[in-house]
Amino acid sequence: GDSVTQMEGPVTLSEEAFLTINCTYTATGYPSLFWYVQYPGEGLQLLLKATKADDKGSNKGFEATYRKETTSFHLEKGSVQVSDSAVYFCALIGGGTSYGKLTFGQGTILTVHP
Amino acid sequence: GAVVSQHPSRVICKSGTSVKIECRSLDFQATTMFWYRQFPKQSLMLMATSNEGSKATYEQGVEKDKFLINHASLTLSTLTVTSAHPEDSSFYICSAHKRGVPGQGAQYFGPGTRLLVL
């Protein structure tokens, strides 16, 4: 079945540091890939997505590139802020699954200190 | 736009009682709603998918008689945990797929409901 593996957390950084959160996946067909963010006390929000190989999703300074050859979708940001502290989930909708059914990674807690 | 609410945000109940959790799409119609369960420091696990006016589709290993889902309208789905036990304590999250929006990713999440069964 489909699965998503994220790097173990928590990740603790100083403000303005570079961020990478690794994500790899296993899926049938051609999945769409997503990063969701969950701020404390709030629901998940879609951060960015990519629907085909070599697509780059970007939003709020975050980027991730759909790499089919390495089955990866790593999240990066050049300079993090304290307000980026949250839990980040990598997810996919497999090409063979029913419409809208998301498979999530385990989540990575990011804490950014001033 | 695209706000999903859940009620209650947290609930504490005694073992053996039933608890109902509501999920509402406030400013859009949702053809499909999803219910997830999230354990501490773990991922979201899909429990069931519900479409308005039809029976929910449950994931393997989820007891449909224990987790009753009703999707009565295009803006409301409810999850009832029947005869709750301490092992049902968890964080329950719903999401709603916006009607008429093609493609994937048009899924909006509620803030979650924390259930504690004593």
Image (tube, grey):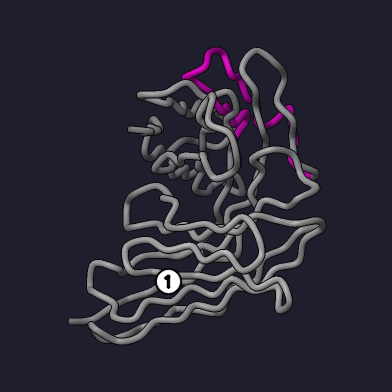
Which residue shows up at 67% across the image and 51% down it? A93
Which residue shows up at 58% across the image and 37% down it? B35
A104 sits to left or right of A18: right
Name above or below for residue B62 compared with residue A13: above
- Quadrant (top left/top right/bottom left/bottom right) for the C terminus of chain A: bottom left
Q: Position of residue B14 (x, y in %)?
A: 49, 36
- Quadrant (top left/top right/bottom left/bottom right) for the N terminus of chain A: bottom right
Look at the image and say whether residue B79 sits in the magenta stretch: yes
Q: Which residue is mark 1?
A: A109
Q: Secondary structure at mark 1?
A: strand
Q: Which residues are magenta?
A: B61-85
Name above or below for residue A85 compared with residue A8: above
A52 sits to left or right of A58: right
Which residue shows up at 49% across the image and 77% down it? A21
Q: Position of residue B89 (x, y in %)?
A: 54, 47
Depth check, front residue: A102 or A71: A71
Depth check, front residue: B91 or B111: B111
Q: Position of residue B116 (x, y in %)?
A: 47, 45
Give amino acid for label 1. Answer: Ile
Identity of the residue furthest to the left in this view:
A114
Name above or below for residue B75 compared with residue A77: above
Q: Which class describes the residues within 10 Å of circle 1: few (<14), some (14-19), or many (20+)?
A: many
Q: Position of residue B19 (x, y in %)?
A: 51, 28
Name above or below for residue B81 compared with residue A10: above
Query: The residue marked by circle 1 belongs to what chain?
Result: A
Depth check, front residue: A85 or B8: A85
Q: How many marks?
A: 1
The image quarter in which residue B48 lies: top right
Depth check, front residue: A4 or B22: A4
Look at the image and say whether residue B65 sits in the magenta stretch: yes
Which residue shows up at 42% across the image and 23% down it? B28
The image quarter in which residue B66 lies: top right
